[in-house]
Each structure stands twice: as structure tokens, then as C-alpha cells.
Amino acid sequence: MDEIKTIIEPFRIKMVEPLSFTTREERARKLEEARYNVFKLKAEDILIDLLTDSGTSAMSNAQWAGIMMGDESYSGARSFYHFEETVKNLTGFKHIIPTHQGRAAERILFSIVGGAGKFIPNNTHFDTTRANIEFTRAEAHDLVIEEGKHPEVVHPFKGNMDLEKLQDFIEKVGADNIPLGMITVTNNSGGGQPVSMQNIRETAAIFHRHGIPFFLDACRFAENAYFIKTREKGYENKSIPEIVHEMFSYADGCTMSAKKDAMVNIGGFIAMNDDSLAEACRNLLILTEGFPTYGGLAGRDLEAMAIGLKEILDENYLKYRIASIAYLADKLRSGGVAIVEPPGGHAVFVDARKFLPHIPLNQYPAWAFTNALYELAGIRSVEIGSVMFGKKDGSGKEVPAPMDLVRLTIPRRVYTQSHFDYMAECILNLYKHRDEVKGVRITWQPPFLRHFTAEFEPVK
Ligand code: F0G
């Protein structure tokens, strides 16, 4: 018999959430009311929401059952011990500290190790990580390999750290001024690109040679592990838990947003081996998040996290997950749309400068794309470009970001193959009529993180 090649969603659906359909005229009006900023739309006016994969997962029947079993005791809850044991088994770290989400873990960690005159290198810092570092007046530095900065360049591990640059960086700023080094798996801001095991191992060795602790930003650790299994020699016959253990074994700790690869709607943690750092973290946790056995979460959230962290290791799930991203990428690519190659683990990134070459960079082509796609199809995507990352030069003139990308971020276990077909058809339709898409101008903006609330109008 022939081998069956169709990869299916590894779940069946027991509870459904209806989608809300709107007309194009209604969406045009809603977009205008939202001042041409899709962050300001009401979610119920969106048909398919690709804003983020964070906190948007569908939980399993086991996770929902766990919610009912949550122990809501203030201290020493059973759910905490279930969560702690699960994370210990997964990561091997000694201290497991729950937080309400990833950035809470970052704030606590960097409040302790950051400060003026300190430097934190990473492949690419996610924006909350960077913001939490810079808030302490420390500096956040991105040292991803050159290949990782070019959308069209194909490389199996575009999230890798540039080891030579890292070495030079440590020598330049001095190991004493680097309280810890990081790698983000997968590298979200660089296109959801994976980091190889060899690169994690060698990065760790460089940090450790200089006495610098090494932390993983582990939000998408399981997706990264699947890429290692399928792309790195020597790992094809290892199980996902084995690969995950090895990844964490090189690190001294991690920060985690459980809203990604723990498939929960809220949650996170910090984990580490260092006793005194853990004590300092717990002290801060009590101040702003909660007692160390709940960290700002309900017992039921800890329970759901513990179960999600086991489910994510299922190879059938990861195979489907990565295949579904590749499926959308293939359809867009064969229709002529330029995307970040190869597609990453949680999203397809469209190169908006190539999609909309007639829109000048100061009219934000990627932002214009998100508006046009919503108006055409009710699909919400997110700009990762010059609105989000544009900077002012010395004279106050705005310098565009290195790339203008649109992220089509795929929530976990939420959309089926026909939803993917719809996304691809609509984007290819938009591509056909791309000449009609107009650039945008900012009419109002806040002093920082402007993309969330800025207001726009189309350029006539
Ligand atoms: N680190 C990475 C790599 C992330 O992608 C995120 C969140 C965080 C840290 C912060 O975690 O949201 O739980 O506080 N990324 C989301 C996204 C918001 O849409 O990519 P959080």
C-alpha cells in the first residue's frame, strides 16, 4: 500500500466558537472608526484573527478538565506542585517561579540583573524583553547571524547567534558588564526562525567561558525542538522530550511566556539554577505578582499550564503545526508573494516592500497591507515594520526599520485547513489588486510603543 501523506489536524472539535461575518462596506467603516489601526478594532468585527499566537490557543479537553481541578489555595496549592514538577522535568532547572506572563518574568529578572552600564546580548530581543532591559537603563543588543536579517536568504537556522560577533561583543563591553546572555527560541522578531542545537551549545560555551550565565527566552521551545529534529544532523531519531532536555541543559535558566508553547490563555514563568538569584526573584514576585506558589495566576491557570506543557511535546501535534505554517507559505509563494524564507514556526511573514512596491517607506507599506487585508477579507494581521520599529535620527527625521514585514500569526489548534485556504485566497486576491492599495500617514502618535494606539489616514 502507498504511504499516506496527508497531514491532518491531530484533534477533533467538540466545542465551537462561531465566527462573525461582516460586509466589505461595514469593514471599511469600522477601519475608519479604528483610525486605520487594526489594534483598535473590536475583535468581534474580525473573521480570522492572525494578530498573535500568544494566549490565543485552543485548550484541550484535558486542560479544561484541569481548570476544574485547580487548587485555589493561597499558598502550597496542589496545582503549583503539579506545575513545578512538570517544568522541572521539562527543563531540569532547580527553581521554578510562576508569573502572570512572559514580560512579568522579564521585568523581575532584569530589575535584578539589569541597570545602567549593563549589556544583555541575544539573537534578537523580543520588544517586551528589550523594553524591560532598557527600562532599567541597561542596553539590549541583537547579534543574530547575517542570514537572519535577509528575508529571501534560505538557511535552516536563521535564528542562530553570530558567535564571532558575540565573542567580539563580550571583549568590547567586558564580561563583568554582562550579567546574563540570552537566546530566543524560536527567534520571533527575526521571523520565528529556529536556533540549532549546535548554536545553543556553542553560545552557552562562549558565555560560560566568560563566567556569564546563559538564559533561554523559551516561549516557543517545542517548535524550535521540532526544527532541530527535522533539520539538524544527528537529531532525526531523538524524541522531542530528549531534544528539549538537551536544549535546556546548556542554559542556567529561562524566561517563558506560557501563552505560546504551553497553550494557555495566560501564564508564564522564570526558572533557574542559581539559589540567590531565585531568592531575589521570589522577593520581587511577592511585591508585585503574588506569593511564589501562584505568581499572579489562579491555581487553575497553573494546572492548565502543566497539562499544556506536556501536550506540546506530542510529535504529531508539532508535525501538523509546522506543516500548517508551511502550507500557507507554499500557497503564497506559488502565487508570487515574497515571504521570509523559509517560513518559521508560528507565523508567515510577508515582505510588504515587495508586495506593495509603489508605496514609499514613509507611507508604511506593511501597515497599509494590514488595513487592506482587513477591509478585503476580515483578516487581522500585524505590522512588524517601520511603525513598530522606525526610529528618529539626530535631526528628528524618521528612519525606516530594516524590513517592513506583515506577520500572519497562527494561533495554536484554532483554524482548520479551509481557514488556511481562505487566508491564501484572500491574500493572493489582494496581491492581484495591489496597485489599488494606498499608503498611510500618521495623524496622531504616543511617545512610545506607538503601533498599539497611533492613528492614521490613507494617503490620497
Ligand atoms: N518573548 C518572546 C519571544 C515573545 O514572543 C513574547 C510575546 C514575549 C517574550 C512576552 O511574553 O506576551 O507573555 O508577556 N510575544 C507576543 C507576540 C506578544 O505576539 O509575539 P508575554
Image (tube, rainbow, N blue to C red):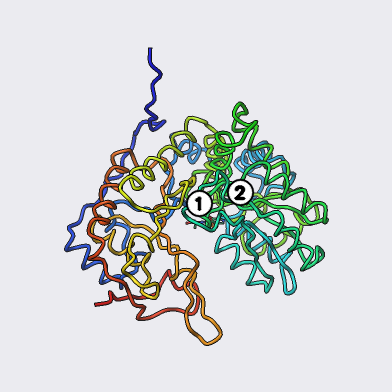
The tag earlier along the polypeptide, 1 or 2, is 1
User: Which quadrant would residue 80 be assigned to in this image?
Assistant: top right
Q: Is mark 1 within 8 Å of ligand 1?
A: no
Local crowd size for mark 2, using a 10 Å CA cut-off: few (<14), some (14–19), many (≥20):
many
Quadrant occupied by the N terminus: top left
**Mark 2 sits on what residue?**
218
- Nearer to us in this view, 460 or 356: 356
Which residue, as the protein is rendered here, is positioned at the far bottom? 395
**At label 2, which amino acid type do we have?**
Ala
* Relative to 423, 2 lies left or right: right
| Mark drawn on residue 234 | none
- Nearer to us in this view, 35 or 187: 187
Q: Residue 87: x percent and y percent?
A: 64, 41
Q: Residue 66: x percent and y percent?
A: 50, 37
- Nearer to us in this view, 373 or 66: 373
| Mark drawn on residue 153 | 1
Q: Residue 365: x percent and y percent?
A: 36, 67
Which residue, as the protein is rendered here, is positioned at the far top? 1
- Nearer to us in this view, 66 or 428: 428
Residue at (22% x, 62% y) in the render: 27
Residue at disc 1, secondary structure: loop
Residue at disc 2, secondary structure: loop
Quadrant occupied by the C terminus: bottom left
